[in-house]
Every structure is written in structure tokens, then in C-alpha cells.
């Protein structure tokens, strides 16, 4: 939101952010103005999408909206862009992937060896008044074994993540000493003689966490949650630390991981590999045979993992009740189930979601799609990680400096937006489900009852999807508002420091608290905001990577028909996810115009035909045909095919069209 500028002259000037829509029209939102100022493409001046600009009102109005022209660029939102090199008669340009951006002129001395057609990353240099096009220099020539490889790299880079580590960071990682020293051992609790193992995906290499188990003389159990001690190796302010902070997270694409830390750290020094002594930061619980937490201990440790399990191996042990360390695994699973049950009793919301994985050939091309189920083995690890995260946050929350809480990166989750929640409650009521809205706890109980009641019913998918979209997004903050979805008053991320920077911050602050040498970090909230922003960027990259592979997979099915479920509805059409392939595409309203004149009813998540009263509603099953698969745009286009009878919306859900 921009700051209102003092008016100059008859029409005035304002400051705001230029947002260019897909249609090419620009709008500048200004504080104090009810509507954004419209800016036509010829009036963008030297501005790019997202730039902070000064805009001057011009004496034209469109439907009462102010219209303006950009007179000054105050701040560039982005200076790095991706595109393709175009060389024509020794004059070089880069056509940026974003259609809303102009071409950039590249001087011959700034080509960095790029040739016509190369994919590149460029850095904006200048755009003077006399220049017809903005000038840039090539930063990186993107090389890959095929188009898919190049596109995955571009997805990482377009979300402002580096695809390689600077040489100084790699050299610093190589200099790190991985030996266990007697001096360091004296500062740690030694768990090397305690049964310890890891449970991870079958293809994992960065093992963040391990579980230890032993029976105590009292009859209780000692269960340790041991986390890679990244902060031992990555010192605050070091070259490695600065690079890790900038990235703030690893990025997981279908065919690769773009790591937060160099491989020497993520896959070797810090990874809790079997049959190796490793430094860890641990939360150790004493647990009764009934699964009650009697007490906990926090501190630095040394472990030796006895075995590396995959989730599939542990799940087989749980189901068959036989296998390596079966007795311990079954006992841990029983305790985890008790913890999970108690968590839901205390106010956690029991949403579930499917995770999709692609089967890839040697070139990275998708040849199949797998739906990952979260089974008991996954939930076993999940519950102990949640318990450790909560315990650490509760411990640090009690530490005060000058009677003030210390700045700490809590993982927080706000209650749902009231407007979204009310829309969902109204919609659910039409299916006969009621919500108690008296307080947050009542709403949570209503959500869980709804999720139980709809299981196996036709409306399950639509209500689950809309319910999830009703929720707020979790983020990092020093202001602890609790975690609504988990039902925790205190929560932090402690268990994945190899792939998340906030966990490194948590480790450092926890150690300061344990040794009673706390140095409050006045920059902590700024760091939280940065990590939250990088997390959102990583999620965007992961979505884009999945979408690319979906489009690549569905290219072979152009013209074929599939069953699908409507996953979203908008005024311009609806999205459908195919039942078997789990690939989502858009059915455009333009393509539906031959059947009827449809209007969008947001309160019913529906498109409704004015003449036929045919309804396309979120959650409905439909037949579609694949008509286009555009890899460059990462877009699937579907056409609706009549074949599944679409039941008209019940009269109680259908508004009569207003006659004009």
C-alpha cells in the first residue's frame, strides 16, 4: 500500500505500487483512495511491474476511476529477471519470461558468452530518458541437459533462490572439521550407547532427526528426539550462515532439492547417518507406559544412529508386528497415537491432505504419478517432532530479561478470517452441518465434528477443500499468538535445521537460555519476516515445479477424456483435477458459452447457467477433455464434456437470476 503524496497542480501526484494485470492494464493502489489509479501501458514510463512509483493524475476518467501516468520510479521491486537471448544483426536483447516486461538491451560486452536462444538470468543496469529499452547485463547463462532441467532451474531462480553456492561458501564448508573432540564431548550428554534410529523417506539424504529409546528402572520410558546440531558448525555471521540466511529454506522440486546448506553439511557433517557419531541438540522425555509426559530435558548431545529406516519399512513393522526393533517401534507408535488423540482433544484441527509424487525416468521426465499417504509411520515421527517443537517453545517463553520476554522466532497460526469463516459456515449449513461460533474452541470442535461427519459422503471433498482454504497461513513472528491449527499456545520450529533457517535461530537462542547467557536480538522480527517470505517463495517454486511436471505428463494425452473433480471456481471458469492423474487444468467460461450464459456465485462456490440452471460447483465430478498443455506457461486447458449427469443445484442453494 503506497503513501499518499501531497497534491501538485490541478490534478495531483500520488505514490504507490504499480501492479500490471494479465490484460496489460496497470493500477496503482494509493492509501486514502477508494479505487486504484488506472495506468494504461503507454503511460508506464520507465516502470516495471511491482515498482514503487510516483503517478500523476491526467484529465481522463474511465467509469469514474482516476487515470494517471508514471512520472518517476522511486524504488525497483526486482532487478533480476529470466529470459531468452535474441541476437539480430549483432544487436542483443533478452525477451523476459514475464509477458508484462519489456525486452532488455544487452551491450556486446555484457553477453558473458551467451548465444542466440540461450536461457539467461539478467541484472537491470539502467533505463535513461533517452533509452528506448532498459539496459541489462547477463549474470548467468543457464545450462541444462534438457528443457525440463532448464525449466526447473528457472523456477528456482525466478523465486529468487540461487541455484549454486558461492565458491567462498563451498570452501568454508570444506574446511569444517567433522571429527568428534574430547573437549566438545565434555559439554554434551552422551547417548551413543542408547538404541537410536532415523525414519525418513526412502530417497532422503539429509537426516535431520533421530529417535532414541530405553526403558528406565522406574518402568517409565526415556524417549529422545535428537536433531542435527547445525548451529555447532554454522557460526552466526559466518560466510555459510549469511548464505543460509539469504536462502532461509531448502526448495523441494519433483526432480531435485535446492538445499539451504552446502552438500558437505546437509548430506554429510550434519546428517544423522547410521553407524556414525553425530553432534545433536535434543529434547529427552520421560514417558509413562500410558503415554503421559512426566518430565523433559533439553540440551546438546552426542548420538550414534544404529539403523536407518524408511517410512515404508516402519509401516510394514507396524502392520505385521514383526521386524527389526519391532517391540520398540510398536511401543513408540502406541505412545504417538495417544499423543495425537490428546492433541485433538486439546483443540487441534484434524485436516488431512494428499501429497503427490512423480515417477521420473533418467532424464527427469514424468512417467507416472504416485499419491503419498500419511500412514501411522509418518504420524509416529510427526507426533514426536510436534512434541519437541512445543516443548522448546514453552521453555524459552518462560525466560525473561528485565521482566520482558526474549525475542524468539515462534511459529504462529492465527484464527480464520471472520468473513471467510462465515462464508464457509453458511455453505456447510446448506448441507445440514451446523457450527458453534461462540469462541475459538467451539469453532475447532465444530470443524472436527464436521470432518468426522462428512467422511465417505459426496460432499466430503468440497467441504474439506473449502475448509482448508478458510484457514490462515502460518508464519514466523516474535509476537506469540499461538498456533490455532495445532491447538498449541507455544510452538516453534526446532526439528529441521538442515532445511529451515528459523530452526537454526531457535537452536542458538535455546543454547543461550540453557547456559544463561542470553543476548536479545533486536533484529529477530526482521529475520522472522524474511524467513516467512522465503518460505512462501519456496512454496511458490514447489507449486510451479509440480505444475510443470503435470503439464509435461499430460502432453501425451491431448484429445483424451478423463473423469475429474472441480477444485475451484472463478468468474472466468473452473479448475478440474483429474481423478487418477491428479493433474489440474482450467475449463474456461469462454468454452462454456456455447452451452449457456453462466454467472459466478461466490457464496455457493458455483457457476450457474441462467437458462439451463446447470451448475458447476466445487467438488462436483465432471468429464473433461485435455485440449492444450503449454509447458512455457505451465498451464493445462481442459474442455467440459457432457457425459456425467450434473445434478441441478437444489432450489435452496440457487438464487433466481435478476432480470435486467
Image (cartoon, rainbow, N blue to C red):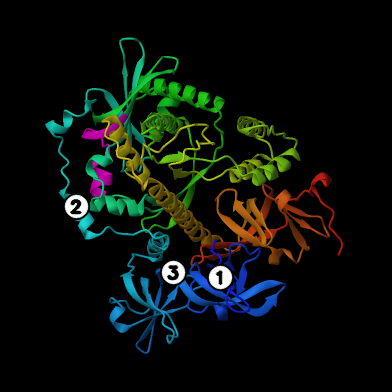
Alpha-carbon span between mark 2 and mark 3:
33 Å
Q: Secondary structure at mark 1?
A: loop
Residue 172, numbered circle: 2
Q: Secondary structure at mark 2?
A: helix
Of labels 2 and 3, the one closer to you: 3
Query: How many C-alpha atoms fall within 10 Å of the one at disc 2: few (<14), some, or many (≥20)?
Result: few
Residue sitting at x 44%, y 49%: 532
Query: How many C-alpha atoms fall within 10 Å of the one at disc 1: few (<14), some, or many (≥20)?
Result: few
Q: Which residue is mark 3?
A: 76
Q: Quadrant of the C terminus?
A: bottom right
Q: Disc count in the image?
A: 3
Determine whether 40 is above or below 531 in the image. below
Alpha-carbon span between mark 1 and mark 3:
22 Å
On the picture, is 312 further left or further right than 206?
right
Where is residue 617? Give x, y as percent: 71, 50
Q: Quadrant of the N terminus?
A: bottom right
Q: Which residue is mark 1?
A: 6
Where is residue 81? Give x, y as percent: 41, 69
Of labels 1 and 2, the one closer to you: 1
Looking at the picture, tell me which residue is in the foreground, 566 or 411: 411
Q: Earlier in the sequence, mark 1 or mark 2?
A: 1
The answer to whether residue 332 is seen in the rendering is yes
> For the magenta stretch, what is the residue range?
263-282
Residue found at the very far right of the displayed protein: 659
Amino acid at each position: 500500500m503506497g503513501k499518499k503524496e501531497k497534491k501538485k497542480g490541478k490534478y495531483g501526484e500520488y505514490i504507490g505500487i504499480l501492479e500490471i494485470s494479465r490484460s496489460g492494464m496497470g493500477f496503482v493502489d494509493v492509501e486514502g483512495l477508494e479505487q486504484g489509479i488506472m495506468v494504461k501501458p503507454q503511460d508506464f514510463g520507465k516502470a516495471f511491474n511491482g515498482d514503487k512509483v510516483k503517478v500523476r493524475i491526467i484529465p481522463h476518467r474511465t467509469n469514474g476511476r482516476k487515470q494517471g501516468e508514471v512520472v518517476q520510479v522511486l524504488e525497483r521491486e526486482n532487478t533480476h529477471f529470466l529470459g531468452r537471448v535474441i541476437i539480430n544483426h549483432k544487436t542483443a536483447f533478452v525477451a523476459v519470461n514475464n509477458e508484462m516486461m519489456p525486452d532488455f538491451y544487452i551491450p556486446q560486452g555484457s553477453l558473458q558468452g551467451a548465444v542466440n536462444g540461450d536461457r539467461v538470468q539478467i541484472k537491470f543496469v539502467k533505463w535513461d530518458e533517452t533509452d528506448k529499452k532498459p539496459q541489462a547485463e547477463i549474470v548467468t547463462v543457464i545450462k541444462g541437459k534438457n528443457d525440463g532441467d532448464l525449466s526447473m532451474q528457472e523456477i528456482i531462480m525466478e523465486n529468487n533462490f540461487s541455484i549454486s553456492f558461492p565458491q567462498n561458501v563451498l570452501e568454508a564448508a570444506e574446511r569444517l572439521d567433522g571429527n568428534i573432540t574430547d573437549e566438545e564431548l565434555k559439554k554434551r550428554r552422551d547417548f551413543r550407547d542408547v538404541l537410536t534410529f532415523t525414519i525418513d523417506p526412502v530417497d532422503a539424504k539429509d537426516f535431520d532427526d533421530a529417535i532414541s529409546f530405553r526403558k528406565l528402572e522406574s518402568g517409565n520410558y526415556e524417549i529422545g528426539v535428537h536433531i542435527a546440531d547445525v548451529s555447532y558448525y554454522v557460526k552466526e555471521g559466518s560466510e555459510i550462515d549469511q548464505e543460509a540466511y539469504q536462502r532461509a529454506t531448502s526448495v523441494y522440486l519433483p526432480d531435485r532439492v535446492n538445499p539451504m546448506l552446502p552438500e558437505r553439511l546437509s548430506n554429510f557433517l550434519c546428517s544423522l547417518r547410521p553407524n556414525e557419531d553425530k553432534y545433536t541438540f535434543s529434547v529427552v522425555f520421560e514417558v509413562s507406559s500410558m503415554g503421559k509426559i512426566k518430565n523433559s530435558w533439553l540440551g546438546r548431545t552426542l548420538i550414534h544412529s544404529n539403523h536407518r529406516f524408511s517410512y515404508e519399512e516402519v509401516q510394514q513393522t507396524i502392520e505385521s508386528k514383526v521386524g527389526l526393533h519391532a517391540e520398540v517401534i510398536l511401543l513408540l507408535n502406541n505412545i504417538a497415537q495417544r499423543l495425537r488423540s490428546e492433541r485433538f482433544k486439546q483443540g487441534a484441527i484434524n485436516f488431512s491432505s494428499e501429497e503427490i509424487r512423480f515417477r521420473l525416468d533418467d532424464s527427469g521426465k514424468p512417467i507416472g504419478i504416485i499419491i503419498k499417504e500419511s500412514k501411522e509411520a509418518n504420524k509416529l515421527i510427526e507426533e514426536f517432532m510436534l512434541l519437541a517443537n512445543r516443548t522448546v517453545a514453552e521453555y524459552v517463553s518462560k525466560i525473561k530479561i528485565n521482566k520482558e520476554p526474549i525475542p524468539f522466532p515462534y511459529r504462529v497460526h492465527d484464527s480464520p478470517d471472520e468473513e471467510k469463516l462465515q462464508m464457509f459456515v453458511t455453505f456447510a449449513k446448506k448441507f445440514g452441518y451446523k457450527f458453534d461460533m461462540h469462541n475459538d474452541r467451539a469453532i475447532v470442535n465444530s470443524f472436527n465434528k464436521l470432518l468426522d461427519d462428512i467422511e465417505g459422503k459426496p460432499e466430503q471433498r468440497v467441504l474439506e477443500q473449502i475448509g482448508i482454504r478458510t484457514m490462515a497461513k502460518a508464519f514466523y513472528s516474535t509476537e506469540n499468538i499461538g498456533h490455532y491449527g495445532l491447538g498449541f499456545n507455544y510452538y516453534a520450529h526446532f526439528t529441521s535445521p538442515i532445511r529451515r533457517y528459523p530452526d537454526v535461530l531457535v537452536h542458538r537462542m535455546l543454547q543461550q537460555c540453557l547456559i544463561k547467557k542470553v543476548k536479545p536480538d533486536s533484529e529477530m522480527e526482521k529475520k522472522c519476516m524474511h524467513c516467512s517470505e522465503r518460505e512462501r517463495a519456496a512454496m511458490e517454486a514447489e507449486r510451479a515445479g509440480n505444475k510443470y511436471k503435470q503439464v509435461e505428463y499430460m502432453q501425451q494425452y491431448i484429445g483424451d477424456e478423463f473423469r475429474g473433480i472441480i477444485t475451484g471456481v472463478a468468474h472466468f471458469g473452473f479448475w478440474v483435477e483429474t481423478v487418477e492423474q491428479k493433474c489440474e487444468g482450467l475449463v474456461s467460461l469462454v468454452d462454456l458459452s456455447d452451452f449457456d450464459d453462466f454467472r459466478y456465485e461466490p457464496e455457493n462456490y458455483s457457476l450457474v447457467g441462467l437458462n439451463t440452471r446447470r451448475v458447476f460447483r466445487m467438488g462436483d465430478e465432471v468429464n473433461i477433455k485435455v485440449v492444450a498443455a503449454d509447458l512455457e506457461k505451465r498451464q493445462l486447458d481442459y474442455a467440459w464434456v457432457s457425459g456425467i449427469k450434473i445434478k441441478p443445484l437444489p432450489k435452496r442453494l440457487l438464487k433466481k437470476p435478476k432480470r435486467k
